[in-house]
Amino acid sequence: MQLSKRASTITPSSTLAITAKAKALKAEGHDVIGLGAGEPDFNTPQYIIEAAYQSMQDGLTKYTPSGGLPELKEAIRNKFETDQSLSYTNEEIMVGTGAKHVLYTLFQALLDEGDEVIIPTPYWVSYPEQVKLAGGVPVYLKGEEENDFKITPDALAEKITARTKAVIINSPSNPTGSMYERDELQAIGEVALKNDVVIVSDEIYEKLIYDGNTHVSIATLSAALKEQTVVINGVSKSHSMTGWRIGYAAGSKTLIQAMTSIASHSTSNPMTSAQYGAIAAYTKEDGSVEKMRQAFEERLNVAYEKLVAISGISCVKPKGAFYLFPNVQEAVKQTGFATTDDWVAALLEEEKVAVVPGSGFGAPNNIRLSYATSLELMTEALERIERFILRHS
Ligand code: PLP
């Protein structure tokens, strides 16, 4: 069968691929430790499950408006007001089936054939593919490891052409855990404003921040920047609701309306009871979001110290999200492997530890380890990695 050109330019998600391989090995009876997952390992808080269950019992099991229930939009608006003093109307918010699909819809609404989107590297695996699926062209801009993997305003200005439509800012970042400071965002924002480049601010890890750092949304820095920015967020990571598929965008009415129209012909609406669960997530509180954050912070601190003590591995300490993104270039060399991808494959084969090679994130010298797993397993995995390096050195 002849596939479309569109389909043949797409690479499947490397994070999902490694998770699938680890699961297959586990099913064969191997003692695999998976550090590939991009999701919290906690169950969804009970009050959210109950709210969704109750909505079903109450017969709320039908279609909803395409861009999401008005009550959910209101809960999201209140969250923006409380957390960031940002005011949006219901027409400026679109709820979709996870932040991933909201981003997909955004690029469909924003890009024409050949439009460029500046994607800082390392990047979340789906950005380039989603841009390509919308006919756009990903333009990569390297965030140097010495600068916590962050881009600079000057480097951004240099990448901008007449075809540049948008730039993506993901803070805290997947895969690096880096976060932009207020003044850095201000300077990046000025470049975007000057060149009329839309800022896509993916803030999905906003609630998972450590070491007393605070999250700044670029949309809060001025009225002009709010106008220029589409904020992407969702409950997947903050409330451990990855399977519920609820994410949202906040931005200009014109763009949000276009996205809602596209959604009306693709997904119709995000699952109804999941929307009721999300309303509970944002309107009720039982302390679980903070409890999960604290658990992640403890794991990060323990795992980070153990990781950087391993020969051939260095790591910028993440400020948020739940990933470590160490540079393993020395370890790969030391152990005689040709590439990080080969090294990662051998690690899974020999030590049954699944990590994601950095090549999928545009950073071939690094690997991504998710600490969305128990401290005990994380410690065991790091010991296995150390043993693997020693054995091959
Ligand atoms: N953006 C980033 C940076 C992510 O890491 C993810 C999930 O891995 C998403 C968006 C998508 O989240 P959701 O589960 O809401 O689709």
Image (tube, rainbow, N blue to C red):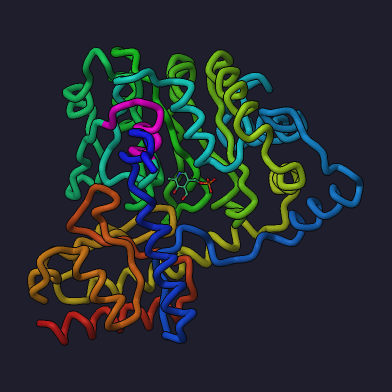
Residue at horizontal 81%, vertical 51%? 51
Q: Residue 105's spot in the image, x, y percent?
A: 51, 30
Q: Which residues are magenta?
A: 127-138
Q: Residue 256's spot in the image, x, y percent?
A: 57, 21
Is residue 239 or residue 362 the one in the foreground? 362
Q: Residue 310's spot in the image, x, y percent?
A: 21, 76
Q: Quadrant of the C terminus?
A: bottom left
Quick one: which residue is furthest to the front in this view? Answer: 1
Quick one: which residue is furthest to the right in this view? Answer: 58
Instruction: Say if 391 sits above or below 299 in the image.
Output: below
Residue 219 visible in the shown view: no
Residue at horizontal 61%, vertical 24%? 260
Residue 164 visible in the shown view: yes
Q: Residue 93's spot in the image, x, y percent?
A: 62, 26
Q: Is residue 38 magenta?
A: no
Q: Is residue 43 left or right of residue 112?
A: right
**How many marks on residues?**
0
Instruction: Say if 127 sits above or below 357 in the image.
Output: above
Residue 156 is drawn in which quadrant?
top left
Q: Quadrant of the N terminus?
A: top left
Residue 2 is drawn in which quadrant?
top left
Residue at horizontal 17%, vertical 49%? 146
Residue 333 is drawn in which quadrant?
bottom left
Q: Is residue 93 left or right of residue 167?
A: right
Is residue 37 or residue 89 the one in the foreground? 37
Residue at horizontal 20%, vertical 70%? 343
